[in-house]
Amino acid sequence: MKTSTLSPLPVLLSDDDLHAQVLVAASDMLVLRALELIGKRIVRDERSRFQTLQRSGRPFFEAYQIWTPAPTQIDAALATAWHNCDRVVAFYGYWDYTETHLRDVLDNYVRWLVKSGQPHNRHTLTLALQP
């Protein structure tokens, strides 16, 4: 029987680093959900868009990079996108964030993504979240 050697455990993150990474991860999920809601509204506009998106293999949260949503679609989607900000702040809060502050930062970040057509990534999100 062949035995393998285990690699050493990685260096543990400091509490501050860990809290920051958890906040970014939780915020990342909120942003992806918001972009998905926008994408579903965009795709619903025309039946052919669903087929185009399906053929491309791209997820709903990337639809804003293909078609430009109307401001009303963005507003409607984001009106319901941030309901879990209170839970994120309560469980994963860092940098003295309040629910309102986190919601405003994420809302502005998503609006910037959609307006610019830039893809979402964790590095850009981390920069947006920093105080």
Image (tube, helix red, strand yellow):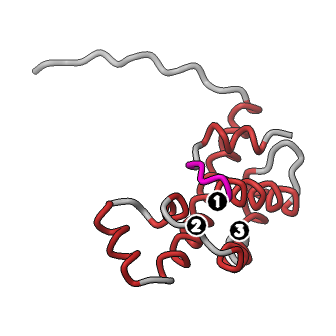
The amino acid on which the numbered mark 1 sits, given as a three-letter code, is Val
Residue pictured at 80% horizontal, 39% vertical: 130
Could you say whether the residue bearing mark 3 is in a helix, strand or loop?
loop
Amino acid type at circle 2 is Thr
- Where does the magenta region start and end? 115-119
- State the residue at coordinates (53%, 70%): 39
Give the labeled residue for mark 3.
Answer: 84
Q: Main secondary structure of the magenta part?
A: loop
In terms of sequence position, does the residue under pointer 1 or pointer 3 come before the other?
Answer: 3
- SS for callout 1: helix
Numbered mark located on residue 15 in the image: none
Residue 62 x/y as whole percent: 49, 59
At 75% across and 64% down in the image, what residue appears? 85
> Element type at marker 2?
loop
Q: How many marks?
A: 3
Marked residue nearer the N-terminal end (3 or 2)? 2
Q: Which mark lies nearer to you, 1 or 3? A: 1
